[in-house]
Image (tube, coloured by chain):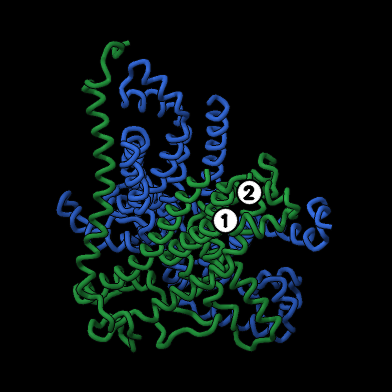
Amino acid sequence: MKHRFQSQRFDRASFFFSGLTGLATLLILGILVVILVNILVNGWPGLSWHFVATIPKKDFFDRETTGVLPMIVGTAVRVFVMTVFVIPVGVITAIYLTEYAPSSSLFTRVIHAAVNNLAGVPSIVFGLFGLGFFINFLGKHLDALLHNPAPVWGQPALIWASLTLAVMTLPVVIVATEESLRAIPPGLREASLALGATKLETIWKVVLPQALPGILTGGILAVSRAAGEVAPILFTGVAYFMASLSHKLSDQFMDLGYHVFVLSTQSPNIEQTRPILYATVLVLLLLTFALNFVAVLIRARVRQKLRGLG
Amino acid sequence: MGLQRGHRARPLEWLVEKMIFLVSLSAILVVFLIFLFVAREALPIFLGRMDSALVQEVVPLEQMDQLSPARLRAYLGLTEKQFAEMDRETRQSLMEVKVEAQNEIPAAFRRDPDARLNTTEWKHLLRPRQWTGYEQPEYIWQPVGQIHKYNLIPLFVGSLKTTLVGLLFAVPLAVAAAIYVSQLARPRVRELLKPAIEMLAGIPSVVVGFFALLIMATVLQNLFGYETRLNAFVAGLALGFAVIPVVFSIAEDALTSVPQNYTQAALALGASRWQTAWQVVLPAALPGVFAAVVLGFGRAIGETMIVLMVCSASVMSWSVFDSARSITTTIAAEMAEAVAGGPHYRILFALGAILFALTFVSNLVADVVMHRLKHRLEGKG
């Protein structure tokens, strides 16, 4: 072999190629920094209390009178309704997978494969699913059942968008919860069982409280993923413009991400709308990043705690 | 009493445990439902039961009773349920509407052979056709105007173009970064780098699309001097931003899961860190890197908003410096104007079903590959 007698300290080829991979890493970080700094610098001047707390009356392309309050509220509400559905289902699935399912059975493999698969389904397909299943199937049948003269549920609505997003973020919650459940030392469970608790009591009183931070992380990750998604809500509930806030589950809603799309592609004068566009993007980014950051913090604290236990 | 409790679950607990089991089936159920309901809306296209011909044979009202119910239903374009719920008079008025609609078609279109064509047939979806007014057979996606042209090939080419550019840009960068972070960087630096790169995944795709549209498109055009400002190249690079964190994080996991004794043995034999990473760790984790690329492909071909914002003109061209309209973009942009249940609507669902099948297969491949790799590394290590 050529390199047999070369010492570790000096090897030109190694130095060169290591440097190359380092450069690739730097380039990726560079892209990240450029995007974030660009948005921060250009978006900051447009951000004001007035902008965040105003409901635009007619023309949201107008710099002076526009605001993003209905979009912030719409995004927050759709994401909140989503968590109500996705967290219980996701957590229970994860409990089954870690506490009950035999770890190497074919059945467990199938559930895992389904979860992985779900994570890879394109977001626009979720949108189609929402339209085909929730609106055209569930909604239409619900209307027929309730004898509604005009469609109430058989049309795009907040609830259908939230349910579509819940389906989309299900794998995020399952994976995060599973991870945190597996990190709990088996000794804790055994101790509880040895004291006479049933399996369910052990899960409810010992395992779940320990896993709470992990479940929270999963929920936050799901929320931050869903908050920025636009494709799944395009046909399931988002509105181009609404004069007031939505207050029923069967209402449509305005949305931050969709608003970014509208402002950047439908504006009659892009130079005029640029400042509001940047400010809206900044609001969206702050929202998703703040959530991500909280998730990272919680996870770091949990790891520290687990290290202490181990 | 207390001693007994651990041995036998109470009836209520038995019930709860069964419920837990049922809920855990949700993931499987959902995948199944997605497949079912996307395919359901697209089924008439796949089975060739849709007729989009503009000019159709008209059945005079008097001959209504001579048609069999099944023929009448197909003629009126109704589902079985709709047909069953209608009384005779509604059917009659529907037939009148049909006759009137046919009479309203201008005579110029009546003579056009294209107007009698069912453009949703498979051969028109996939093969080029010389439409009236064109000089040679062409692939055209044009679901507007009198005669809707639904050739899918330009959309496939559009998706492929942007995806390939994205992968060519993202995969080398992401894999190199994964090697650096998992093998070469100091542990302290690694703890910082990994979440930093994964932050890229936290940027919503509308924001990436916005950035590509406003900043990248201009910068790249000044740099390379091509003609169309918004083209598949810009969209592909922006797609790369979305693909990088996916490929990076899976490749990094695979590289890290290679057992320590592999690296230690190589280092003990006098190999440098780079030689160890390149000749020992990377080959051992190669299936994982492959899985990362496959999942990156799935992410790229399924991404909607980035391509939608950057380019959307449907042109049949293999050049990356021309515009492109991908499968996802087409669905997102046209679903709002498609009539529910009509040919256009069904074709968009068919595109969704194709997309779903594509990502389903790539996910499955990646899943199997990763599972085997884990098995092998654990078995040996």
Q: Quadrant of residue B293?
A: top left
Q: Please state the horizontal and vertical placement of residue A120, each as a whole percent of the image.
A: 50, 51
Left or right side of A107 for B335 = left
The amino acid type found where label 1 is placed reads Gln
* Secondary structure type for disc 2: helix
Write down the residue under mark 2.
A188
Disc 1: host chain: A
Residue B352 versus residue B84: which sits nearer the camera? B352
Count the labels in the image: 2
Which chain is assigned green? A
* Secondary structure type for disc 1: helix
Mark 2 → mark 1, Cα distance in angstroms: 10 Å
Task: Say yes or no: labels 2 and 1 on the same chain.
Answer: yes
Residue B298 versus residue A167: which sits nearer the camera? A167
Whether residue B131 is visible here, answered yes or no, is: no
The amino acid type found where label 2 is placed reads Leu
Residue A149 versus residue B183: which sits nearer the camera? B183
Which chain is assigned blue? B
Which of the two labelled residues, at mark 2 and mark 1, occupies the earlier sequence position? 2
Circles 2 and 1: CB atoms closer than 8 Å:
yes
Whether residue B363 is visible here, answered yes or no, is: yes
Q: Quadrant of residue B49?
A: bottom right
Residue A210, which numbered label? 1
Look at 44% across and 71% down and name the residue there.
B146
Disc 2: host chain: A
Q: Please state the horizontal and vertical placement of residue B258, each as a whole percent of the image.
A: 46, 30
